[in-house]
Each structure stands twice: as C-alpha cells, then as structure tokens.
Amino acid sequence: MINYTAHVRRLMSDIVLRVPRLSFLDMNRILVFARAGRADREGPYATCHCVCLPSSEPGYYFWRDQTTGALTRRSEWFVTKSPIVRVGSNQIDYMVSFTLPRFCDQRRVSARKRARYPGHPVWMAKLDTIIHELYHIDPHQPGIRRIERADGTLSTKCHSPAFFQDVVEMVTQYLTSSPDPEILEFLHYDFAGLTARYGGVVATTFRGASYPRRYVEAVVPPADASIPDCPVEPLDLPRAVTHFGDGDLVTRRFFAEPRRTVARRKVRAA
C-alpha cells in the first residue's frame, strides 16, 4: 500500500529545498495528515492550520439593548488558545491536512487553474495545491500569511491575484529545478489508479474525529478590567483536547466510499 501523507511530506521537503521563497520552512515543525473527504462532494482539497498562535487577549461576549444601547448581559471572560502538538521531540507549529480521496481526484479542475497551466497534465493541479498550502505560512510571524492591499493595509482575505500568481511561479521554479521524477510520480494517479497500482491507500491521521484546533478557555478577569454591572452567562464550552502527541496519530486506510476503518496502528511521524 502507498502511504499518501508520507509521499506528500517527502515532496514538500524537496520543494522547500528547491524553491527559495519557501526555504524558511522547517519541515520538522510541520505535520502532514489526512482527513476523509469524498470526491463527489464540495469542499477543500487541502487546508493549512496554524497551531502556534499565542493566546488571545482576555475578553467577553456581550449583548446590548437595541433601543438604549445599554449592556443587558455578558458572558464570562475568556481567551482563545492553541493546543500543544508534538511529534517525537518536535514541537509542531503548522499542520497541512489533505482530504482523501477528494485531493487525489481533482478531475474537475477549475477553469482558472487550467488557465494557469495551459497544456500541462491534470496532476499539476495537485502540485499547485501543495505549494499553495505551504505558501500560506507567514515567514515573519506566527499565523497564516496576510494579504496586503494596494494602499499597504492588510486585508482579512487569505488570497489575492498576486498570491495565485506567486504559486504558479513557484510551481514552475520547482519543476525547472529538475526534481527526481520518482518524487512526483504518485501525483499522476487518481484514487482508483493508486489503489490499482499499490493495493490501497493509507495515510497518517488523528485517532478520533477531532484534530488540533484553537479552543476557548474561561479565565479570571484582568485586575485592571472595567467590568460592566449586568447579568453574567456561563460559557457553554465543549470539552477541548489541549495536548496532542504520538499516541494521537494513527495510520489509517482510506477508501473511495466511506466505511468502517479496517486497519489502525500507531505512528511516530507523518
């Protein structure tokens, strides 16, 4: 069987060696994992997740009277935090997740993406997605890369025409650096082709349905906080997992259609 996330990780490691704009990335601090996503459903092919953001400033939710503007009630004070993720001795700052089999089956490549790579094979869309997700990582501060507007201010958006063009240039730069064709070979196949060639597709994923993400924690108000005199509603917080390690990672087989997991074992790295 082919371990899809291991192959993606190997490709990413080669990319950061050959593409100067991504050379700041430390693959020891990036976790690659898979999530289930059917090819016949809408949804992302891949996602970049930041797990190194600092805790937010303390705050609270509040409600106002629509007529008078007076505060009628507020929530408890809270902060949002990033979970701690460690693989072996490495602290993880970012994770890139791939939805399988959807990522493998990018048959309906958008007109925009076809226009970026005229005359190139369909599998180029997958390479574009991989570099796209790596490019989301901000080189200067923790978090996802911010997009700068024409006037120099930062946009709340994560994409811009310049962002997409930068990705095209990096894809071209990587391919013209003469990478080993064997590293790229797995991208040539859709999910059915991988299954036929290797007998099945496995990938690193998280043991349960959950994976590391920001969570909310109630806190004591700061000593200098101005606290409005109004009713306080307790926060209804789901139980959050705050630490993830090797024991939370497994190798799981993925199928073209959802079904019960048939194989699972611990792994040390993605």
Image (cartoon, rainbow, N blue to C red):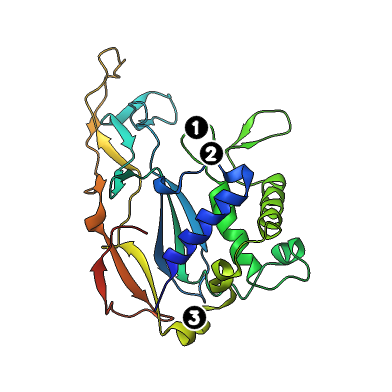
Q: Is residue 37 above or below residue 224?
A: below
Amino acid type at image mark 1: Gln
Q: Describe the element under mark 1 as helix, strand or loop.
A: loop
Q: Quadrant of the N terminus?
A: bottom left
Q: Describe the element under mark 3 as helix, strand or loop.
A: helix
> Which sits in the foreground, 221 or 230?
221
Q: Is residue 199 above or below residue 220?
A: below
Neighbour class for label 3 at 10 Å: few (<14), some, many (≥20)? some
Residue in view at x 55 percent, y 66 percent: 183
Q: Are marks 2 and 1 in contact (CB under 8 Å)?
A: yes
Amino acid type at image mark 2: Asp
Q: Which residue is mark 3?
A: 194
Residue 119 appears in which quarter of the rendering?
bottom right
Q: Describe the element under mark 2 as helix, strand or loop.
A: loop
Q: Is residue 15 above or below residue 52?
A: below
Report the mark closest to the observer, 3 or 2. 3
- 3 or 2: tag closer to the N-terminus: 2
Q: Quadrant of the C terminus?
A: bottom left
Please give the label number shown on residue 141: 1
- Which residue ends up furthest to the top in the rendered image? 224
Q: Which residue is mark 2?
A: 138
